[in-house]
Amino acid sequence: MDWLRSWLPSSCIVPGPSARGIRTTNSQTEVSTTASLFEAFSLKALHVKNRIMMSPMCQYSVWAQDGAPNDWHYVHYVSRAVGGTGLIMIEMTDVVPDGRITVYDLGIWDDAHIPAFRRVIDQVHAYHACVGIQLAHAGRKAESLELRPEAPSAIAFSDKYRVPHELTRDEVRRIVDAFAEGARRAVAAGVDTLELHGAHGYLIHQFMSPLSNHRQDEYGEPTRFGVEIIEAVKSEMPSSMPLIMRLSATEYTDGGYHFEQLIEMARVYRDHGVDMFDVSSGGNAVVAIHEYPGYQAPYAASLKRVLNVPVIAVGRLESYDLASSFVERADVDLIAIARGLLKDPYWANSAALHFEGRVQVPKQYYRAFARRFTVGDAS
């Protein structure tokens, strides 16, 4: 881990007005030296007003158990848009009912879900934030129904989980089709981007890992399933819409893959159409992970450097100075904030005040800021 820690900043740099960042065209991204946390970012037709993304975090709050977002999700996501977040990534949203972790998870397996998502997305857009949906299938971690969970191989996640059913080829292909249909519905609901969940021990990750994939057919190749999903999803997306993929950089255990192998799998995904990687870690084995502020960002920085691809860093980045330093040094392109945005829906505005002494808020909130700071209308 010493080589990873060498990526961590010894001192945090506060972004200044002369920072430079990303210049884009529809065909490529040109990366220059530094960028402020509050400089815009563009990738294809995605134009984000700053470098702050709300990390997808399961809320387990679909009380009707029907997969559709409700008032909780509306308030949850729209409030972070009001709070200045540039890109809202809606939580793990499952493409089939039996792919949910719990029955309280979001789903996008039916056209009836589209209006409920559109209600949230339209209002997020009204406050000048971009929005994506993370498409997923929990695989062997699905505990939502009485049916046995499904996985590449009949290997339980732990002794506390049921042994999953090993997917047949036809069942694998039906799931690939379900991802495509989920993408179609998400596009119809108005998203600006999509993210595939290939991390944290869920189904795409399970196919990638020797811990969970012992197949002897073509799907024993670790990237085959993911590539088929990428191609299927992109067939339902506008060519101008970027595709993001979340990956676990390492599995932290003997028998699992390590970062060097992950880089090669990510290379395959990039070459088949992934435009940006959201780099997390772990989740496919029961193992204690030593977490510290910014502990996963060096993986993202290395992936960016080796593959020359835009990346998102996530993991204990609540510190404004630490988050900014990774962008300022051009280690990463976006910062995904998780717990920080649960604690403070206005984390982005708070960071803007910390660095710049100015913030854009709805006019209804001016009285809280106008006497001390420069304000702008975000309504």
Image (cartoon, helix red, strand yellow):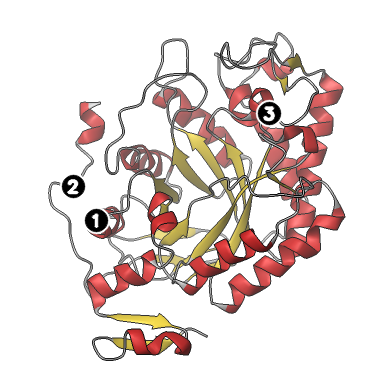
**Residue 361, position as x, y percentages in the image:** 43, 82
Res 156 → quadrant = top right
Which residue type does callout 1 highlight? Ser
Residue 128 visible: yes
Q: Quadrant of residue 356?
A: bottom left
Picture quadrant where residue 102 is located: top right
- From the viewer's perspective, tell me whether residue 23 is left or right of residue 221: left
Marks 2,3: beta carbons within 8 A = no
Decide which of 50, 147 is in the foreground and name it. 147
Q: Position of residue 281 (x, y in %)?
A: 43, 32
Label 3 secondary element: loop
Camera-side residue: 345 or 135?
A: 345
Q: Which residue is mark 3?
A: 142
- The residue that appears at 18% across and 47% down in the rendered structure is 9
In the picture, measured across the screen, residue 80 lies left or right of residue 184, that is left
Q: Are marks 2 and 1 in contact (CB under 8 Å)?
A: yes
* Quadrant position of the N terminus in the picture: top left
Dot 2 or dot 1, earlier in sequence: 2
Q: Amino acid at mark 3?
A: Ala
Residue bearing mark 2: 9
Question: Residue at the spot x=35%, y=65% of the render?
Answer: 21
Q: Whole-percent x and y of residue 162?
A: 68, 15
Q: Residue 341, position in %: x, y?
A: 42, 57
Q: Mark 3 touching mark 1, by CB under 8 A?
A: no
Q: Which residue is mark 1?
A: 325
